[in-house]
Image (cartoon, helix red, strand yellow):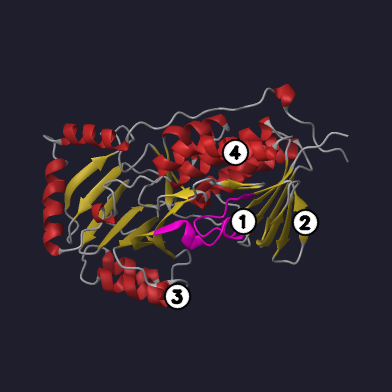
C-alpha cells in the first residue's frame, strides 16, 4: 500500500485555495475548512504583478484572471470639489505604480481558484474535501501527526495542518501562540464597502481624496455599476472598535465630516452595505512560519497590512512554495516545512515593506501637512518631473526576490492513497 499525506488547510481564501490546488494536482489528499458559510463574492480589488503573476501563470490561472480583470487605469488625486491635481497612470509606471496591469476583485480571484480546484478534483476524485461553515478549535500535535478538533465537534487526525486563515489566524494562535506576540499595530484602521457608482466618477480611475487624519478613495468595481469605497484612518489603537460596526461607522463619519467630493454619498451608503469591512492595520511577523507539523501561509504567516498592497502576492507565493515542498518530500514533512520557511523568508520581508515607511506617508495628520502634500503631489506627478518619480518609485520597490521552483519530477510524486 502506498500513501500520501493528508493535509488540513484552515481557511478557504486565496492562500488556502491556491495551496489546495497545488496539492490536489500533485495527488495529495487535502481537506479545506472555511469559517464562512459560502464563498464570499466581490471584495476589494487585488493586483497581480511580479512573482504573484508568475505563480498564476504556473498554475494556469492567468487566462481566467484576465477575463475578470477590472478596468483600472491609474490613481487620480482629487480635492474637495473633485478636481484632479495629480495622476499616476498604470501605463506611465509600467504597471509597477499604485495600480498594476492586472487588478481583479478578491471574490473573482477566489472563484477562479475554486473553478480550477473543481477541475482538479474531477480529474482525481477523492483527494479533496472542502467544507464551509467549519473552523478549528483545538490542535494537538506529536511527531507523527496532528489531532484537530472542529467547531462542529468533529475530531480528526492529519499528517500536516496549514493555517491560511488571515491576519487574525486561529491556527496561529492554537499552534504558535497569542496574536499579540506576532502583531505590531501601525497606527490606523482601514475600511471598505461597495456602493452604486456615482455618475460623474471618471471611468477606469481610482480617485483618492485626502483630509487631515484620513484618506477616502473610490475605485472601479468588478460590476461597472458599482464602486468600492476605500477608507484609511490614522487613529490610535482602540480595542472597543473590534466587532462593533456602529462604533466603526461613527469613527468614519467623524473623520470624513466636511470632506466634500463624494464623501456624503459614500457615508449614506455605508450603513446598508452588505460587504462592510473594518479592521485595525497591523503587521504580522512570524520568524519561522512552521512548527513541527503545522505551517502558516499568506497573511497568517507574514503581512505588512493593506498599506503594502502585497497581501495577494504573499498568499499566492507562499501557497505555491509550500505545495512544491510538500510534493517534493511527502515522506519528510517536517523537513519540507523547514525548507519552505527558508524559501518564504525573502518574499515575506518584501511583502511587509510599507512605501514611505509608515502610515504617515499615506495619511497626513494636519491641514498644513495636507496642503504641503497636495502641492508636492501635484508637482511630482507633473509632466516635467514624472520621469524622475518613475525612477524613484521603481528604486523604492527594490528588486523582487526570484521565485524558486522546488518541483519534484513526475516520477517522484507519490501515488494516491489506496482505498
Residue bearing mark 4: 338
The segment highlighted magenta reads 162-184
Q: Which residue is drawn at 62% across and 61% down?
A: 35
Q: Is mark 2 on a helix, strand or loop?
A: strand
Question: Pointer 1: what residue?
Answer: 175
Please identify, in this view, whether the residue under mark 2 or under mark 3 is nearer the observer: 2
Q: Which is closer to the viewer, label 1 or label 3?
A: 1
Cα distance in 3D space between marks 4 and 1: 16 Å
Decide whether residue 11 is among the magenta residues. Answer: no
Question: Sequence-wise, which precedes: disc 2 or disc 3?
Answer: 2
* Residue 149 visible in the shown view: yes
Q: How far apart are marks 2 and 1 (CA)?
A: 16 Å
Q: Please rate how many residues cluster around mark 4, counting C-alpha atoms within 10 Å: few if below 14, some from 14 to 19, many from 20.
A: some
Disc 3 target residue:
244
Residue 186's spot in the image, x, y percent? 34, 58
Question: Could you tell me how far apart the alpha carbons at marks 4 and 3 are, in whole angstroms?
Answer: 39 Å
Q: Name the residue under label 2.
A: 156
Judged by depth in the image, the label closer to the viewer, 2 or 4, is 4
Amino acid at each position: 500500500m502506498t500513501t500520501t499525506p493528508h493535509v488540513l488547510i484552515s481557511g478557504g481564501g486565496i492562500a488556502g485555495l491556491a495551496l489546495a490546488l497545488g496539492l490536489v494536482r500533485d495527488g495529495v489528499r487535502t481537506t479545506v475548512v472555511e469559517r464562512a458559510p459560502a464563498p464570499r463574492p466581490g471584495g476589494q480589488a487585488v493586483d497581480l504583478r511580479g512573482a504573484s503573476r508568475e505563480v498564476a501563470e504556473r498554475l494556469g490561472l492567468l487566462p481566467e484572471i484576465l477575463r475578470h480583470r477590472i478596468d483600472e487605469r491609474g490613481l487620480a488625486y482629487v480635492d474637495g470639489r473633485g478636481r484632479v491635481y495629480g495622476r499616476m497612470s498604470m501605463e506611465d509606471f509600467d504597471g509597477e505604480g499604485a495600480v498594476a496591469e492586472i487588478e481583479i476583485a478578491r471574490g473573482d480571484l477566489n472563484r477562479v481558484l475554486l473553478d480550477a480546484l473543481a477541475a482538479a478534483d474531477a480529474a482525481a476524485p477523492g483527494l479533496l474535501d472542502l467544507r464551509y461553515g467549519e473552523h478549528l478549535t483545538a490542535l494537538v500535535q506529536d511527531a507523527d501527526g496532528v489531532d484537530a478538533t472542529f467547531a462542529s465537534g468533529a475530531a480528526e487526525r492529519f499528517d500536516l495542518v496549514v493555517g491560511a486563515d488571515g491576519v487574525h489566524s486561529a491556527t496561529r494562535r492554537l499552534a504558535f501562540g497569542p496574536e499579540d506576540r506576532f502583531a505590531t499595530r501601525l497606527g490606523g484602521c482601514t475600511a471598505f464597502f461597495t456602493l452604486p457608482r456615482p455618475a460623474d466618477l471618471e471611468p477606469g480611475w481610482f480617485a483618492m481624496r485626502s483630509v487631515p487624519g484620513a484618506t477616502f478613495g473610490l475605485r472601479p468595481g468588478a460590476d461597472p455599476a458599482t464602486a468600492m469605497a476605500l477608507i484609511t484612518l490614522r487613529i490610535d489603537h482602540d480595542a472597543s472598535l473590534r466587532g462593533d460596526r456602529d462604533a466603526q461607522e461613527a469613527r468614519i463619519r467623524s473623520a470624513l465630516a466636511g470632506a466634500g467630493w463624494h464623501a456624503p454619498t459614500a457615508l449614506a451608503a455605508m450603513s446598508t452595505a452588505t460587504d462592510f469591512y473594518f479592521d485595525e492595520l497591523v503587521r504580522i511577523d512570524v520568524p519561522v512560519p512552521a512548527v513541527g507539523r503545522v505551517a502558516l501561509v499568506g497573511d497568517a504567516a507574514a503581512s505588512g497590512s493593506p498599506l503594502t498592497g502585497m497581501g495577494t502576492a504573499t498568499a499566492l507565493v507562499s501557497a505555491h512554495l509550500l505545495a512544491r515542498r510538500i510534493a517534493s518530500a511527502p515522506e519528510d514533512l517536517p523537513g519540507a516545512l523547514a525548507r519552505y520557511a527558508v524559501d518564504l523568508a525573502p518574499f515575506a520581508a518584501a511583502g511587509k515593506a510599507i512605501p514611505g515607511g509608515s502610515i504617515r506617508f499615506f495619511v497626513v495628520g494636519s491641514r498644513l501637512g495636507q496642503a504641503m502634500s497636495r502641492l508636492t503631489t501635484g508637482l511630482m506627478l507633473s509632466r516635467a518631473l514624472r520621469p524622475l518619480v518613475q525612477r524613484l518609485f521603481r528604486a523604492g520597490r527594490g528588486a523582487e526576490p526570484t521565485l524558486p521552483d522546488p518541483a519534484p519530477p513526475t516520477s517522484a510524486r507519490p501515488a494516491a492513497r489506496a482505498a
